[in-house]
Amino acid sequence: MNRKRFVLPLCLSCAIGLCGCGAVEFDLPYTIAQSNSSFDFDIIKNENRYGSFASTLAVVSGDTIASSLSLDGDTFDDSVIGSAIMVDVDGHEPLFSKSAFERMYPASMTKVMTAIVALEEGNLQQVLEAGEDVVVTESDVQSAKIQSGDQMTLDQALHILLIYSANDAATLIADGISGSVEAFADKMNEKARELGATNTHFVNPNGLHDEDHYTTAYDMYLIFNEAVKNDTIREIISTYKYSTVWKNAQGEDVSYECKNTNGYMNGRYLPPKNLNIVGGKTGTTLIAGSCLVLLSEDKSGKPYISCIMRGRGVDNLYKKMTEMLESVG
């Protein structure tokens, strides 16, 4: 795995003392270059076991296809997709993984982390006002055409962010929550480290291309797994169409309506027959390719998280995502 190096010093003297095992201190340097993931880390001392902080997360050690899947992994080669992962959320089991630790560009899947940080740092009724840097002038960049001086609540901005993937909504949120894109990106990176997404680095809240803005399929699982614990995010990503009204700089109403960019939600692609698509987040740039992270559920309500990065075209992305999901049971 190509990951950043860090040191995880663990001093367990207090914990061991409480267990009646004596005052023993451990100092354990750890590098991500080691074969064992930080998520595998456990200590056994005098029959006392100290579990890893990721005991409720799926641990991936390499390319995997669960024996329960009816899936031909050979068809998921680099000519079709760059990386992929599918996880049984409740069972904390990786069902499928391909190049899950390879750094790739997330494009607008970035906005999942934007939403997480926004909801932790702000409140839904908070009013955000657009500055000049919010305005998108490029014709090929997804935007809600928010103008300088426009005002809307964080709730409205989050709907536009996650449903329509508007890049100007991402900047509006970043400025309104943290005062600048740079300060907000710092909070995104802090949250990534907190979630264990150590192979991730953000420089903006929207995912527009930057060489220093990257993640992995596994880290996207970690990030999305955190996101869908929030009822507001789950509600938004499951919404097909959204209509709202905000105020412009002159105090006039601006009516706005958008549809979900998720191809399963907007009817462009048929969803898998055996699973219900709860929602997800798309991402597309020329360099990142076609990306998608999803939450789906089987008929009993059992949840799965799946992610594909660097799909070679949107048709290939949804074809492979459907194959992956239909292989479950």
Image (cartoon, rainbow, N blue to C red):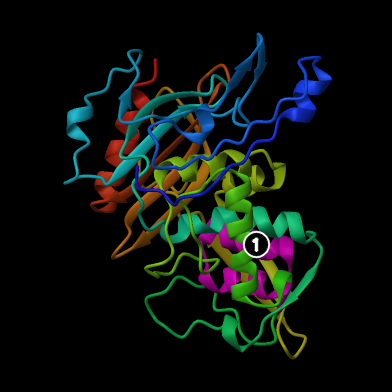
Give yes or no for residue 195 being in the magenta stretch.
Answer: no
Q: Which residue is mark 1?
A: 187
Q: Quadrant of residue 52?
A: top right
Give left or right: position of 274 versus 78: right
Q: Quadrant of residue 158?
A: bottom right
Give left or right: position of 290 versus 149: left
Q: Quadrant of the N terminus?
A: top left
Characterize the magenta stretch by its predominant secondary structure. Answer: helix
**Image position, residue 96 (x, y; %):** 35, 28
**Residue at image x 42%, y 74%?**
141
Specify the segment rendered in magenta: 151-176
**Residue at image x 23%, y 28%?**
73
**Image position, residue 47 (x, y; %):** 65, 8
Local SS, label 1: helix
Give yes or no for residue 163 being in the magenta stretch.
Answer: yes
Q: Is residue 296 above or below residue 42?
A: below
**Image position, residue 327 (x, y; %):** 33, 22
**Image position, residue 320 (x, y; %):** 28, 37
Q: Circle 1: is it few (<14), some (14-19), or many (20+) Cα within 10 Å?
A: some
